[in-house]
Image (spheres, rainbow, N blue to C red):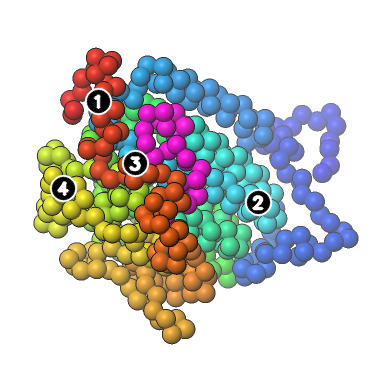
Amino acid sequence: MSIILNTKLNTKQKFESQTRDLMWDPKDFDMNKIYPLIEKEGIILKDPKKWEDPFRITYNQYVKIQSEKDSIYHAVANAFEANHGHAKIVDSRWYEGVKAFATAVQPAEYQAHRLMAYIGRNIPIESIRFATFAQAIDELRHAQIEIKHYAHMSQYYDGLHAYAKTNENHWFNTVPKSFFDDALTSGPFEALMAISFSFEYCFTNILFLPFGSSAAAVGDDHFAAVGKTVQSDEARHMALGMTALKMLLEEDDRNVPIVQKWLDKWYWRAYRMFSVVAVLVDYYPRIRPISWKKAFEIYIEEQVFNGLFRELKKYGIRLPLHAEDSIKEKEHYSHVTMRILDHYKHANMFRGFKLQPDDYEWLSNEYPSFERNYASYFRRQGDQTLAVTSPGIPSVCRVCQIPLEFVDPDQPTKSWTQFSEHNGSIQMTCSPGCKHIFEMEPEKYLQMWWPAEAYVGGEFGENMPLDLFNYLGFSPEEAGEHYSSRDRKRWLEYQQALHMDKRFN
């Protein structure tokens, strides 16, 4: 880098002098050995130096901004804890949803931290390397903020007292693990599309905005603050996904079919991983600012399909292969996922619950097919809360690891489970999208850990179900149904002790 003395730099020149020309160009070592994965993906890079830094921020500025965000978040969190905020929420079942979030989303934050470090190490483009460096720190910050929140919750609620063990061993956690294990074993550019485009650009808004709004609506200011401080970073992360996608397409026309294949795969992978968000938006909050269906229409159909992909047409990019399936499934997604969670509530550290009259009313108004296809299932619980529980732990999709219980959106009384033959054995996937992904790389997905096989093979122990719960890190009393649980009883006693009264007691 050349330095011009006694010359005043404009803002852009100053920024570039602090962030560019920092790459090491070795003269005595083969670049292909330093970055061995670049050529394996088939991506053509003609002029990586023209790639723009999507964050446009120096490290000093970054630290200052993040410090201010942390100060605001911790002020809200401390006030919530000091003022008995847990007793003021509308309905205690909300915290079962936050536990589900802890199982499905927090591990993804830490895995995203690792994934961004992997991408930055293996892509020799300085603008991308700085962006992934900053995002890796962001993701670690998110993971730590959320863990701190769960540590506070564990003083009041079941299921979180051995969070590290549960996080590692819970069968439900194989869903985010499978996504990030898949990305971490892909090439660096494919991994960048997986996290920065499919995860961040397509789905991060539908994760933190509707669920964060629900937190505010039910009175959980602490979790609303978690969502707000995390979402404030996501705008930058979305910019990285958008920049990387466009630059890959502009580098060379030969990149287009490779990128299209990645978008086909990772859109569906992220969509399936976010199935739990549909439940967190439609079921666990007693007051719901928005439905999953409406959120999907706003953030996916309008912003991604009708906005971004129209712009990408000029590069020769079409909608992801199974985008239409996800549109058709929006009417059923949250109900089927809630039914899956309810089937296995005896083996989860977050509980299911009996729907209340106002729940049926809201769901029927938002989803015309709810009463016809799903209401009867939830009513069967009645006073017997385990009436519709499935024994043991479930068989899951070979790709996304979600139990094989999704319905065909065109025929919602029929299963959508798909079958593929590979080396003389039959493998099951939950949908045409996952079947397509499996058949592209069958050997990869056959290596994934399958909870049902581990259960049958004795990996969890022999004294069932006690050994299973010991392996998972919680007790049978911490599972089951919320309204008949000790969590509910303690929450009501907590309210009474503080002379508080809420509408939905």
Residue identified by numbered label 4: 384
Residue 22 location (% of width, % of height): 77, 45
Please, what is the three-letter code of the amino acid marked with disc 4? Gln
Residue identified by numbered label 1: 492
Q: Residues within 10 Å of mark 3 (few under 14, many from 20)?
A: many
What whole-number distance in Å separates the C-alpha atoms at marks 4 and 3? 18 Å
Residue identified by numbered label 3: 478
Please, what is the three-letter code of the amino acid marked with disc 3? Glu
Which stretch did the figure color magenta? 150-171
Q: Is residue 370 left or right of residue 186?
A: left
Nearer the camera: disc 2 or disc 3: 3
Q: Residues within 10 Å of mark 4 (few under 14, many from 20)?
A: few
Instruction: Report which quarter residue 388 is drawn in.
Output: bottom left
Q: Residues within 10 Å of mark 1 (few under 14, many from 20)?
A: some
The vertical placement of 187 against 289, above or below, is below
> Which residue is painted at 74% across and 32% down in the image?
9
Q: Is residue 18 left or right of residue 367?
A: right
Residue identified by numbered label 2: 120
What whole-number distance in Å separates the C-alpha atoms at marks 2 and 4? 53 Å
Q: Nearer the viewer, residue 415 or 33?
A: 415
